Image (cartoon, coloured by chain):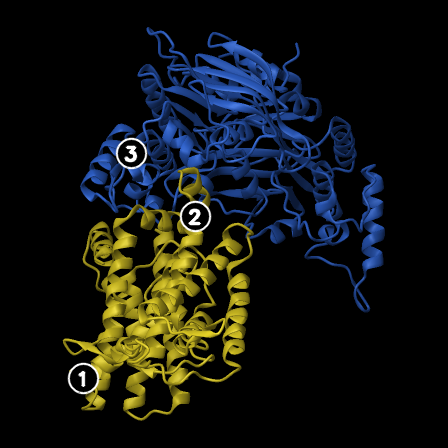
Chain colours: A blue, B yellow
Amino acid sequence: MRLPIHEETPTETPDIAEVVLAARHVTKSFGAVRALKGVNFDVHRGHVTTLFGENGAGKSTLMKILSGVQKPTTGEIILDGQPVELGSTTEAQELGICIIHQELSLAPNLTVRDNIFMGREIRGRFGVDYAEEERQVRKLMEELEEDIDPLAKVEDLRLGQQQIVEIARALSVDARILIMDEPTSALSAAEVEVLFKVIHDLKAKGVSIVYISHHLEEALTITDHAVVLRDGTMTAYAPRAEIDLEWIVRNMVGENFDLGSPPEGYDFGAPALTVKGLSVPSHTDGELAVDAMDLDVKAGEIVCIYGLMGAGRTELLECAAGRIKPVAGSVELHGQDVSKLSISDRIQSGLVLVPEDRQRDGLVQTMTVGRNLSLASIQNFTRGLFTSRKEEAVIVEDSIRDVTVKTDGPEAMIGSLSGGNQQKVVIGKMLVTDPSVIMLDEPSRGIDIGAKAEVFRILAERAREGLAVVYTTSEVSECLSIAHRIIVMRRGKISAEFSHDTTKEAIMAASGESLVH
Amino acid sequence: MSATSTNGAVAAKKSGSFSLIKVLLEGRAFFALIAIILAFSSMSPNYASVGNFLIMANHVAIFGLLAIGMLLVILNGGIDLSVGSVLGLSGVFAGWLMQGVEVGNVIIYPPVWAVVVLTLCVGATVGVVNGILVAVFKVPAFVATLGSLYVARGIGLLMTNGLTYNNLSGDPSLGNTGFDWLGFNRLASVPIGVIIFAVIAVATAMLLTRSAFGRWLYASGGNERAAQLSGVPVKRVQVIVYMLSGVCASVAGLVLSSQLTSAGPTAGTTYELTAIAAVVIGGAALTGGRGTVLGTVLGAFVIGFLSDGLVIIGVSAYWQTVFTGAVIVLAVLLNSIQYGGTRRS
């Protein structure tokens, strides 16, 4: 691995002239999951420091610790050379640290003005001084060159405008250190340009900025320093002038861990899943999340769908599974149109989905491991009116062994398992129904690399036995693992298709994270 | 019925040591009932006799029936405020049929079995309406069933003009006698009402622990989205639980009006709250997905034996209300300790 010419590895005691805010040896654990494993991080005074890393690398966790949302398990935060305890976001704000979250934290039922001054309303003689608040909001919007009415309700604004309101709120508290977690993911190109102008102005005023973005090229145009985080550990530090996109990708993805390779030595069967001209409306605005999409997956084939957030991957899979209704197009299973079938009928006929958010859509937290595993296949062990405990126990024991769930037994509560094992339960639940097509939405989200490799191994084994597998991911390294074919989605359409011998750069370029040389 | 004890055993095994507090917490409704019986027996010699237990059980049966229906709805994550009114409406409807229905110029006196079946249909209908409002039209369960609470009570009042149907014993010459059998007769000296309660409790326990429907109910109450994606027909489950709750309320209405041989439109007022209390004391979580029939039955006995005991030792009705309230708060407090603890570990 080539090293950058000038290392910027943080020193044990941060240089006060250079570094305004620093994290030293910070760790953070959520139950059995270690999100951060001893991280050092410097925020450079009056500069933009960009934190790069894949999903689940721990970027958002680190930002939450720096802004007082969460407390580190161990380690310390140093502000201007002094160790500080950030007990809450309010305490952080008082010290001049402000965060713009990835998920919007606005109250949609309130006006722009009320949102911007939420929790720190300007007091007048008769309660809140609304006129003064409104005047300040208008001034902020002028600075941001945005035509947003201070009295408009947030729910009536476009997503991009809501993001601007979030930024305006951070600006209104005169933050010295501003943390922006994916601020551009919902913005149009013109809005991004305005935001970058604002960032330049803020820098000129001496504000230090921490920036996180999946749009690597975009981030490179604005940043002064780059830091890369991978699996909870910092892998590289460098000034902007020393680096290029290739350097970032190499450090982000790593080259060492093997997530497997496409299973070989057999021929694919007949087409198992066929999607024709499928269009799905977006739930946030009136546009199409999936736009006249065609997809063919053969028995035994593994297809990976790569795309950025909002590319339409989740909508495509949920529509194929029967969760949401399409506005046009059809879904066929072995040549049979299943578009009219309910979710349970589709499961019966062999088409199953492992959802993206396992806490919200995958698991029933009030039930045991065994009952979660058998939930989708109750019919298989129901005899007449009653379920057969014996047959259920056999199915559950087999499944636990099959997908290698580490548990005290089928009677353990599902919440006692680690994230990776919970994910295996969700996958196992669907495999028990003996499907012919399995779709997995971000199966590796929030699980550690070892569990990731095991999940992929299980899928590859099943594909060899004739199962058609479709999985989505937003991590390039996972595209180049077990998939025979990689499809890149962008704005609801297929923007490119690759075989498994392609490169990471080519995939990222097609997704919109363009790498221009 | 053994679900509680198995869970308890597993929990104790998992923690690696036998924990007295855990056992007390898991079986709290049972221990509370024992404590109540011991306390009142020491205070009154009349309390601990088979005869008195059967009388009290007969009282418990009424809101025990409501509580079992309520348990199904609460397991689903909902609430059914209409059961007290449905109980009243069912009694009035049965009374109205017993008085004879005018069709054209003829007055028809339906036989008792027909009265029972038609009355159960009334409860089922109200339940299905509740279920459709909640499942299909996404009306919050609290509001939908609050509406039916008023509507059912209003219809009961309209049917009787606010009066009470007396004399439901029927007439041998009309062939519709036997209505009071439900309330007065005994099988092996056990009141019929108690037997009906026991049969429905056992049937519901079987439904919950051994049938696919029971599993669907626990799953959709625990996490509706996950259940739906696993192929559980969540809407159908929702409609059915409200229907069953309505049917249970009708059964309770029949037993009560048979015990009284009269049917008043205001019968069962606020019983829905007693039913909810019994379910909660029995350890069910109002957020859905947790609870057992055994717990609910014990919860109903705790409330019934407590309030009857207070009557027997001569405590005023006002104090009874205070005690019942305190027991409910204590139960909810213990629930949050139990489930809060599971979530943290």
The residue tagged 1 is B51
| Near-viewer residue (B212 or B35) | B212
Labels 1 and 2 within one chain: yes
Say whether residue A236 is visible: no
Q: Residue at 33% across / 68% down in the picture?
A: B65
- Distance between mark 3 and mark 2 Cα atoms: 32 Å
Say whether residue A158 is visible: yes
Mark 2 belongs to chain: B
Residue A405's mark? Answer: 3
| Near-viewer residue (B136 or A409) | B136
The residue tagged 2 is B236
Name the kind of residue labelled 3 in the image: Val
Labels 3 and 2 within one chain: no
Whether label 3 touches label 2, CB < 8 Å: no
Label 3 vs label 1, nearer the camera = 1
Name the kind of residue labelled 1 in the image: Gly
Name the kind of residue labelled 2 in the image: Arg
A481 over B330 or under it: above or below = above
